[in-house]
Amino acid sequence: MDIEKNLNGEEINGIDGDVDGNDVGVPTNSTNGDVMKKPLAVPEEKSKKKGKKLARQSSKDGLLGVAGTPNFVAPHRKWKNSRRSRNGHGRGLPKKGGAGGKGVWGKLGSELWEEYEDQNDPNYDQEIYDNRNVELKEIIPEITLDDFTKKTVPIILEYYEHGDTHEVADSLDDFLTGNMRAMVTKVAVETALEHKQSQREMTSVLISDLYGRVVTSKDIMKGFDILLENLPDLILDTPDAPNLVGNFIARAIADDCIPPKYATHNDNMDDWNDHALTALNRAESLLTMHAGWSHLDNVWGVGGSLRPVQSITRQMSMLLQEYILSRDIVEAQRCIKQLEVPHFHHELIYEAVIMTLEALNESIEEAVCALLKSLDETCIVSPEMMQQAFRRVYDDMTDIVLDIPLAYSILDRFVQRCFREGFISEVLVKELPNRGRKRFVSEGDGGRIKPVNLAVRDF
């Protein structure tokens, strides 16, 4: 029997109970006093309690689990998809700054350092690598002249459409380098030589606007030097290239882009070819005119629709009068092209027909008919402009006949001549107006003209 003591130091006698444990934990009386039986040992298989089985819950159920307890993630699954370090070290940041992993190229700029670490690289320098005396600089490859021309010409051609010099400057800043700044003037002028006067005026404005922002005065003068050297080649495509380049130089001086001494006291005057000297003499003559430099603003004229209608009509009238005196069709065609108003050619034909009616001369009718035929054959004047001009004359005949009594008969003869030449359609001939003969009402009416509508007239 085991003997134990209680907290007061008294002995406690344990009493064996039944196997079934009926007397276990039942107090009994003893000679020493009230004592408590020692509980029997619990079998080992009974000491293992089964844990409560948690109720299965789908993901669609609420956030609370069994008995209202919140759901939780198992610790062994909590870090499954985490990118933090699992070795307990570090600040928990991704590896290699987020540039590590399969299929990743690496952090931006890391390939630059690896280039020096490759000993098989012919540019590898062990001493520089050991000292870490490496400085990385951005190097922009120098653009070639052919590539520069291929990029600049489309920009200038697009400028002829929109006329925005700021857009041209922004486009040039993307690829323009220091050595190619002089080529801006060269490419712009060479492109303008192949176009009309209005495009040349826009090119002079472009050079003036690019001055101080994209190119300097030295760059512009260097560009003109290249043009003067290339004049023997430019004159093959543009026979009037020396005079045109001289106009560009004079206009650049008037716009304060280059100094006046470039045209008057050029240092390379003795080395220039004959065409270059012609261009410089042209520029000097424009600069020394009595009217001053104000006329150089219109050295290319005001082309296209920018001119007022009265100015265009006056130039057309002068052009036709000069043709009547000289009978030079080629010069007349050149002057018409130089006007650059294809949308206003009906006014030219209208003025030519009116001039024919006023001349009362058959030779002038033949000359004007020959001019109109040449304009139709060379497609300088479209058939629509031709028909519109003749219809305008038809509509104004009631007013024209007041000044030219024989206008109807002259117009009839001129239209028949033009129809025989083949540049007027038969439909247009049928639309030719006829003047009806006026008759008196009777012999005793005192000379009164017969009214148009007798039904509404009271006698």
Image: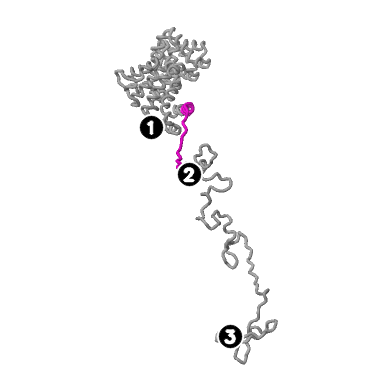
Query: What amino acid type is highlighted by mark number 1?
Result: Arg
Q: CA distance from mark 3 to mark 1?
A: 108 Å
The nearer-to-camera label among 1 and 2 is 2
- Name the secondary structure under disc 2: helix
**Three-letter residue code for mark 2:** Asp
Rendered position, 412 above or below 119 = above
* Of pointers 3 and 2, the one earlier in the residue sequence: 3
Q: Position of residue 229 (x, y in %)?
A: 41, 19
Residue behind mark 3: 5
In the rendered view, does 104 fall on the left or right side of 313? right
How busy is the neighbourhood of tag 3: few (under 14 within 10 Å), some, or many (20 plus)? Answer: few
Residue at 30 percent across and 19 percent down: it is 291
Q: Identify the element where label 1 is drawn.
A: loop
Location of residue 365 by image quarter: top left
Let me know if residue 139 is in the magenta part: yes
Residue 140 lies, in percent from the top left, at 46, 34
Viewport quadrant of the C terminus: top left
**What numbered label is drawn on residue 213?**
1
| Color style of the picture | one colour
Which range is magenta?
131-153
- Please name the residue shown 53% across and 38% down the image: 121
